[in-house]
Amino acid sequence: MKTDLSVIGTDVRRLEGRAKVTGRIEFVDNIELPGMLQAAILRSQVPHGRIRKVDASRARSLPGVYAVLTGDDLLQMNIDPFVGPAFKDQAPLAIGKVRYVGDPIAAVAAVDRDTAEEALELIDVEIEELPAVFTVQDAMKPDAPLICERLVPANTFADLIELLGGEDVPATSNACFQYKLRRGDVEDGLRRSDRVFEHTFSNPASQHGDLEYHCSIARWTSSDRLEVWSATQSPSYVRIMLANMFHVPESRIRVMVSYLGGGFGSKLYMKLEPLAALLARAAERPVKVRLSRKEEFLTITKHGVSATLRTGVTKDGRILARDCQVMWDTGAYADIGPRVTHKSGYTSAGPYDIPNVRIDSFSVHTNKPPAGAFRGFGIMQVCWAYESQMDIIAREMGWDPVEFRLKNVLHEGDRQATGTIVRSLGLDESIQAVAKAVGMGNGNALHPTTATHLRRGKGIACSMKAVITPSVSAATVLVHPDGSVSVLSSSVDMGQGSDTQLAQIAAEELGVRVEDVGVVHPDTDVTPYDLITAGSRTTFHMGNAVRLAAADARQQLWSTAAERLDAAPDEIVARDGKVWARSAPDRAVTHAQLMFARFGARAGTLMGRGTFETHHGATDMETGQSDNVTAHWMCGATAAEVEVDTETGRVRIVDLATAVDVGKAINPFACRQQIAGASIQGTGPALFEEMLQEAGQLTNASFVDYKIPSLPDLPERVQPLIVEVAHPEGPYGAKGIGEAGIFAIAPAIANAIADAVGARVPDLPLTPEKVLRAMEANSSLAPSGGEGKGEGAS
Amino acid sequence: MKHEITLTVNGRQHPLVVESHRTLLEALRDELKLFGARESCGMGLCGACTVLVDNLPVSSCSYLAARANGRSITTIEGLADGETLHPVQQAFIEHGSFQCSYCTPGMILTATSLLRDNPNPSADDVKDYMAGNLCRCGAYYEIIEAVLGAAERMRR
C-alpha cells in the first residue's frame, strides 16, 4: 500500500458540488420515461384484520387506469410474492391479512397521479377486524393475537442465514427473533457486587426523515428484461430479490441508482421496487411509484425499544456484572429487525470490559409500521440505556463520570462480551477528547448551579459498534486512453460523500488527479456487487475494493512505465497525473502517454479488479461467543453542556462535542461533516422526535406535527472531533464513521440535564414536560441546587 | 377548471394550461422539467420546494400555479449568470454546505432573498430567516458560514 500520500488526508470538495448547487443533480424522481404511468397505493385503515374482499372492478374501468393489483392478483402471477431481508414475511400488497394501519392493500397505475388516486376511491374493501397489539408488552402476553403466522427465513445475507436457519416454521409467539449472549456468571457477579442498580429505559419509534421520498421506476424491455431506477441504498440486494421474485436470472434484472436525497437506513432492502415491477408488468408500461410524506411515516421507522439493565459494581469503580433485557418493537413485519436486534446485541452491555454479562434481546411484532435500520442498527437505542445508567451509577457512587468510564472501557487486546478480542478501538482517546473539549473530567464534572432559573450541566456518553460481518464489496477501475479513470462501484452516494472518497482512493493509488476520476453510479449491469451502503461499511469495504482494483490497474500500467522509463516497476512513482522513476524525477510522463505506449494508439482500456471480503468466526448460538464477530469496531463519544430552564423544563444545548475514531481520515472535512451532521441529527430523537399513535393510528405523520431539527434548534456550538487509531486492514488505516457520531448524543444530553438539575428522564425524547416532571419528582432538588439522586437505585 | 396562464420562469415565458388545483411545484417539475425545486413535506414548511416569485421566497408545493400567472419566477436553475455561479452558490461549494443537497436549492434561494433584505446579517439573522428550510443531513453550520461568506463577498 502507498505510504507517501498526496490525495488521502486532504479536504477534497465533493466532485458533484456544482451539480448540487445548481439543482441539476439527478434524483430518481426526476426521471421520466416515454409512456410512464404513475402509481397510487390503497392502504389499510385498520391495524389488524382478515381481508374478506377486495373488489377493484370499478377502478379497473376508470378511463386512464392501466392496471390495478391486489394481494389476490399477486397469487395469480408466476412470482414469489413474499420478500424481506430477514424473513419472507411481507408481500408488496397484503395477502390474506392486513397487519398495520397503512399496510398496502391494492395499487393502481394510471396516466397520472390524480387518476390513480381517483381509482383508489373506487376499490371496495371488506376487512374483518382482528384484535391488535401496540406495545411489546402486550404482544408478548400468552394470549396475544399472533401477527405473523409463519417465519420463513429469507436465506440471503450470510449473517442472517446463520442466525435464522433454513427452515420455515410456524410462529409460536410475536417474538420473531431472540439474541442471547452469556459470558461468565451474571448472578454470581451481581451477588459479589457491592451495589446493584436496576433501571428501565425506553426510546420511541421515530422517523428517518430523509427529505427525498422513496421512489422507484420499473420498465420491462422488449427482451423481457426488467430495468429499475430506484432510490435505494442496496442495489445489489434489490437485483437478487427481484430475480427471486420473478424467477429470472439476475442477469435479466438491471437496477440503477442516481444520487439519493438522504437515506439513514430508510432506503435499505426492498421497498417500492417490487410494486413498481409488478405494476409495470401488469400495465405493460413503465411505472413510477413514489410515496408522499405521510406514506413515508407508514413505510419504515426506527425501532422503539425498552431496555432493562441490572448492573453490579464494586466499591473501587469496576463493573462486575451486567444483565440486559432488550425488547425491540419491530412492527408488523420483521424487515431487518433481527439484524438490528443481533448486531446491537453484541454491545448491549456497553463498550466496557465486564467479566459477567447476560443479554437477552427480543425482536417483537406489533400492529404498527415496520421498523428497520436507522443509522447505527440499534446502537442508539442500547446506548441510551447503558449510558444513562452509567451516569446514574457514577452519581450514586460519587464517582466522576469520565473517570468511571475510562476505568471500565475496552482497550486493545481486551476480550469484548462476545469473546472477540478488541483491536483498533480509539474509545479511550474519544472520551478524553470530548471531555477536554467541553471542560469535563478534571476530577469533578459537577459544578455549582446559579441562582437564576437557568442552570447549566455537563454530561458524557460513549459507544461502540461492530461492523456487519461477513460481507463482500467489489469494484472495477478502468484507465481510459487519455489516462483518466473510472471507478465502477455499487456503493450509493446518498449524501455522505462516498463518490469523492472512492475517487480519492483511486487517484492516490494511480497518481492521477482527483478531478480526472469519474465514479460510475450503481448499475447492476455494470458495477460489481456490494452488500449494502449502510452500517458505516463503505470507506472500509468499498474503499479497500477500490484500492485493490486501482492497484491492479496500476500494476498493469507500471509494467509499461518500467519499459518506457527504463526502471524497475517498484521504482515508479506517480502523483498529480505524472509518472516517473524515483531516480529520474525530471523525466516524467503522463498516464495518457503510457496508455498510448501500451496500446500503440489512443485506444484501449486497462481494467483493474478488486474484491474485498470479510469473514467471521462461528458463533455459539446459546452464548453468543465467537473468536471473531466483526471485521472492525467503530466507536465514538459525546460530551454535552446544556442549559435547563427550571421554570419550563426547556433544554438548550450550549456545547456538543463528538469524537469518532475514524482510523485515518481519507477526507478530514468530510469526516467532520459526517460527525457534525450526525450530532445535529441526533438532537432530534434526543429532544423531541417521537412517532405518536392511538390504537395503531399515527397521529403526527407530517412534518407539521413531527418536528425535525431546524436552524433555530441548533446547539450553540457543535464540535466534531477526529480520533485516528489506524486499523491494520482499513484502507490507509481508515474505518467506517457514518454512524458513530449519533450513538451517544441522547444520553450525553440527558446526563448533562441530570448534572444541571438532578432530574433523570428514562424515556426519550427529553421534552420540556418530561424534564419538568422529573424535576418536580426529584425531592432533592432544593432551591440551593443540591446534588441530584438518580432514581430507582436498588 | 382549466386556466390559461403564462409563467415567466428564469426570464423565459411559458404559456401553460393548468387545472385550478395544480401547484406551482407541479407546473415547474411536470410541465417545465425543472427539477431543482423538490417536494418533501408537501405542506409548505420544509423549504425544499422554495422558489422566488417576484423576488420573494415561496413554497411552490403550496402555491397554486394559476396564482403565478404573469409573475416572475426564479428557480435555482436560473440563479447563475451563464457559467458564473451566483455568489451564494459559489459559497455553498466553498464551504461544503450540503451533503445530499435535496434542500440546497431552497436554502440558496432563501439565502439570496435574505441578503437582498439584509446585506450584512448575523448568524442569528440567518437562523431566523432560514428557519423554514430543513436539512436532515445537518449541514446547518456550513450553510450559515456560506451565507455569511457570500454576504461579505457581495458587499465588496
Image (cartoon, rainbow, N blue to C red):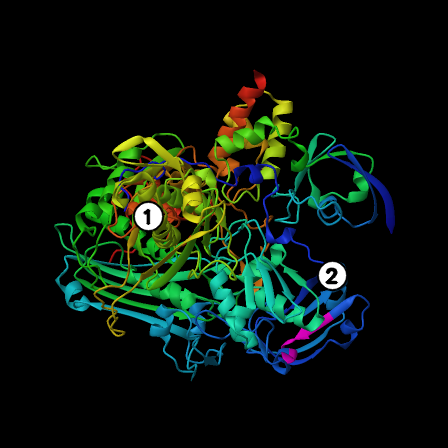
Marking on residue A35: 2
Whether residue A494 is visible here, answered yes or no, is no
Task: Provide the residue span drawn in magenta.
Answer: A67-73
Q: Nearer the viewer, residue B74 or A128?
A: B74
View extreme (top): residue: B156
**B79 left or right, relative to A606:** right
Which amino acid type corresponds to the residue marked 1 in the rendered image? Ser
- Of all chains, the one bearing label 1 is A
- At horizontal 25% and vertical 49% (from top left) the residue drawn is A727
- The residue where tag 1 is placed is A559
- At horizontal 27% and vertical 53% (from top left) the residue drawn is A729
- Of all chains, the one bearing label 2 is A
Magenta span includes A69: yes
Relative height, residue A256 to residue A137 (above, below): above
The C terminus of chain A appears in which quarter of the rendering?
A: bottom left
Which amino acid type corresponds to the residue marked 2 in the rendered image? Gly
Relative height, residue A535 to residue A715 (above, below): below
